[in-house]
Amino acid sequence: MNRVISKQEALERNVSFVLRGIALATGIYQLFLGETDVGIIILLAVGAISAPKLFTRNRIVSMPIEFELLFTLMVILQFVIGETLDFYSQVPYYDKFVHFSLPLIVGFVSFMIAYVLYKAGRLRLSTGPLMLAIIFMTLGVGAFWEVVEYSYDITLGVHTSYLGELQGNASENAHTDTMFDLIADLIGGMLGALLGLLFINAPSITIKARVQRFVRAARRSLRKKPV
């Protein structure tokens, strides 16, 4: 079993390395040949994933491989595929897919973090309120982003064609686009929290072993070490 887990973890770390390499190359390209602000965001995100200790003042000394993969996937979906390959403009409803996928990942990650805190004795909250809190948190993040998009459209958006209008698209007006984005955020957050609950309660011995390994890794990650 340990040998199988070791091989699986090695494979996952290789996949994470490749994905981060793709994101890094995209960030460098955007920084010098494309949209500089997008390049900076990508490079900062890759840096935070690769070296969380530097970005959290030693509060998070490492990151479990599960989080590495999921956070890197978020960068790939949003900035590499969405922005650099221009899927937001070229692929119908890609933005809805991202509005669903990112809250799903955030909901799952949030549930797992809460589970680690619960196992460490730092959190006392039953499953129902916890899931509701995660769902409303992901929806709140989505709503905040819609406010950012609206603010951009009525200020910078009317004076520049650099990004174009962020709200609305060829098939939806701004109001319809915003509402469907929020619905996608809500569904993604709900499924993410549910997946986290199913994951920690899965009857599979392999998954149980993985959950235990994840909890140990996460608790080590959150253990503050001397600078």
Image (cartoon, rainbow, N blue to C red):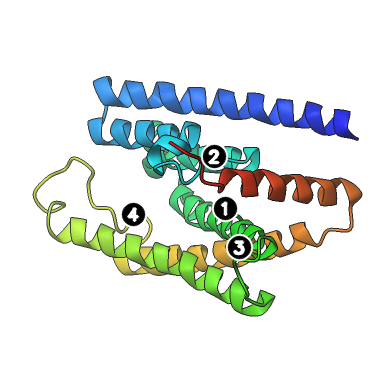
Query: Which of these two is toward me, 196 or 181?
Result: 196
**Residue carrying label 1:** 105
Query: Which of these two is toward me, 43 or 143?
Result: 43
**Residue carrying label 2:** 73
Above or below residue 31? Residue 79 is: below
Is the residue under label 3 in contact with that under label 2 (CB below 8 Å)? no
Is the residue under label 3 in contact with that under label 4 (CB below 8 Å)? no
Q: Count of labels shown?
A: 4
Q: Residue at x 47, y 48 (%)?
A: 94
**Residue 201's image quarter?**
bottom right
Query: Which of these two is toward me, 173 or 72?
Result: 72
Q: Amino acid at mark 1?
A: Ile
**Could you tell me which secondary element the residue under label 1 belongs to?**
helix
Mark drawn on residue 114:
3
Residue 68, x across and y down, in percent: 57, 38
Q: CA distance from mark 2 to mark 1?
A: 9 Å
Is the residue under label 1 in contact with that under label 2 (CB below 8 Å)? yes
- Answer with mark 1 or mark 4, whichever residue precedes in sequence: 1
- Answer with mark 2 or mark 4, whichever residue precedes in sequence: 2
Q: Amino acid at mark 4?
A: Asn
Q: Residue at x 49, y 50 (%)?
A: 98
**Could you tell me which secondary element the residue under label 2 belongs to?**
helix
**Residue carrying label 4:** 169
**Residue 162's image quarter?**
top left
- Answer with mark 2 or mark 3, whichever residue precedes in sequence: 2
Residue 10, x across and y down, in percent: 72, 26
Circle 4 crowding by C-alpha within 10 Å: few under 14, some 14–19, many from 20: some
Q: CA distance from mark 1 to mark 4?
A: 25 Å
Above or below residue 115? Residue 160 is: above
